[in-house]
Every structure is written in C-alpha cells, then in structure tokens.
Image: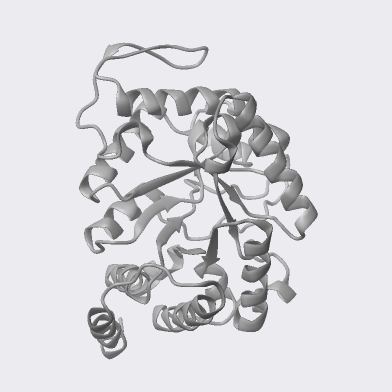
Amino acid sequence: MKLSGEFPSVSYREGAAAVVQLAQAIEAIGYDHIDIFDHVVMGYATADRPAGPYPAGMPILEALMTLSYVAAVTSRVTLGTEVLVLPQRQPTLVAKQVSTLDMLSGGRVRLGLGVGWQESEYEALGEDFRARGKRMDEAIQLLRAYWGDTQVNFDGQYYRAVAMGMEPKPPQGNRLPLWIGGHSQPAYRRVGRFGDGWLASHIDEADSARHAIDAIRRSAAESGRDPEAIGLQSMVAPPPREEADKRFYMDHDRVVARVAAFQKMGFQWVSLNATAIFQAGARSVAAIIDVLGALHRRLRAEVGQGARLPLALASTVLKCYHASPV
C-alpha cells in the first residue's frame, strides 16, 4: 500500500517557510506522494446560484505553482494533483506547465485530472461547462501528443494544432502517468480508455468500489488495454462537510481500519487529507506534521512499508522542524 499526503493550502498562513517545512516533512516521514487539489476561484451564493459545498473564501494555492515550489525542496516524493480540472484550463499551456514540472523535478510527476463540478468557475475562466466531458477526452489526447511527438498535428472538435513543436519533453515522455478522478459511468469509461489510474473520493462500502472497478476494467478491455495495469487510489475520507466528520482523523484506529478496508477492496494507494487533519484540530503546521507522522507509523505497521529517506537524514530533518517553528 502506497501513501499519499494531500497538501493543505492553509499552510501558507504561517508563511512560505511553512510550505517548505511541511513538504519536506511529508517526504522525510516516508510518504510516497504529495497531491494538491485544484480550484482557481470559488463562487459565492447569489440570487441565481446556491452556496457551494465549500466556502468561497477558502484559501487555495494554485496547484501547479505550488508543486513547482515543492519540487524545488524535495528529492524523492512524487508529485501530483487530486485533481486538476483540465477542461477549464487551456490544454496546450497545461502540457507545457506539466512538462516543465516533470523536467525540473527529475521525472516525479503523476498528474491527476477531473472534469470538476463548479459551473461558475468555468464561467469565470471563460470555458464551457456543458461540454467538459468531451473536451476532457480530447485534451488528454492532446497532452499525450505534446509530450511524445516531435511535431504535433491535432484536429479535434475543440482543440487544434498544426505542425507545432513543444520542447523539452518531460523525462517520462508521453507515458507520464495520468490518473483520473470521478464517480460516474463516463468517468469510469474515461479511466479505462485513457487513465493509468483511478482517483476515488467517495467510497463508503465494498459493493460500490467493486462496481466502479469492474466498470473501469471493462472499459480498459474494450479499449485493448490491460485492465490489471490501472492503479487504484482512494481518499481515506473526503473533505468533511458535517461537524461530526471533522474529528475523523483524530481517531487513528478508525483511520487504520478504513485503510485496511481499502486494501481489501483492491486499492494500492490511499490519500490522507491534511486539510481535514487541520479541521480535526491540528491547527498548525507542526501539529499537522505530528499527526501525519503518527498515522504513517500506524499505517506502515498495518499495511506494510513504503519508500523513506535514510533514517538518520529523516530524523535530522524532523528535529529541525520542531526546533524551528514558523
């Protein structure tokens, strides 16, 4: 079982040094991957639009910029998004940004993609919300073309390129891993056709997981791909919306039990949400690091070992974090 830490934008409140502190701690503790979620803007309630599930004033660092910052201060942990809302962005620019990030991080990028849910955000970015599924499928193919082809020619319904070049290519080339999120039949088909993995977020029982995984594997087989090669990751718990759910990450027995259940369902990865850890009561970067460390120790004992920095280096780094509050 591999462990991802979903990076909390709220860490910026303690300054840029705290973002570095947390990123390096996640790596030193032994997590395999850092994910960050994506929103550019959030909509307030209006006369024509109800309030969304999250407050419009929620602090959210831009995902790719933050990953570039994190890449510069880490060396082993892989980096990704959970998820980047691809159809509301210009895909040629995304191809360039991600290629550059992969180059400067030494080939450590795993890009997570989704279609999103917030129509007002699409409107603010000048993109069509209603066509987001079709545009997502096309944009994924365009990303692969830019990362692999010397000369790109692409004639789609929504995107076009005529004899275009993009260099440098990412070190991983057009096999840079693309993991796709979503909980719908179109999303499952998309994972099977195009994805290297599925990013699940609302799995609450084994039957729903089995239904989704079966649909993904059917789509992969129909597309001539190996169904067993598609990776599976789930959030341990989605971002809490109810007050009762906000204490989940403080009950480590529940966290471990849920991860063990995901492992039995066939998931090879889980993601621990550090924003939810903050909401559960770890109200500083140092406190978030303590909880992530304690959960990592419990989870490795329960589900096995992952990659780590050398023990002496990790111990030194973590001592420095607690000796130098920000």
Name the residue rendered at 65%, 30% in the picture: 219
In percent of width and height, residue 73 lies at: 23, 63
- In this rendering, would 216 be left or right of 159? right
Q: Quadrant of residue 268?
A: bottom right
Residue found at x 28% / y 85%: 315
Q: Is residue 170 rendered to the left or right of residue 272?
A: left
Residue 269 percent across, percent down from the top left: 53, 59
Q: Which is nearer the eye, 95 or 3? A: 3
Work out whether 18 lies above or below 227. Answer: below
Above or below, 228 relative to 256: above
Residue 306 x, y percent position in the rendering = 42, 68
Q: Position of residue 296 (x, y in %)?
A: 48, 77
Residue at screen point 73% across, 47% down:
50
- Nearer the observer, 145 or 288: 145
Q: 42 or 72: nearer the eye?
A: 72
Q: Residue at x 68, y 58 (%)?
A: 265
Left or right for 81, reference 46: left
Applied colour scheme: one colour
Res. 298 visible in picture: yes
- Is residue 315 depicted above or below 177 in this figure? below
Residue found at the very far bottom of the displayed protein: 323
For the C terminus, the quadrant is: bottom left
The answer to whether residue 251 of the structure is visible from this angle is no
Position of 239 relative to 94 (above/below): below
The number of callouts visible is 0
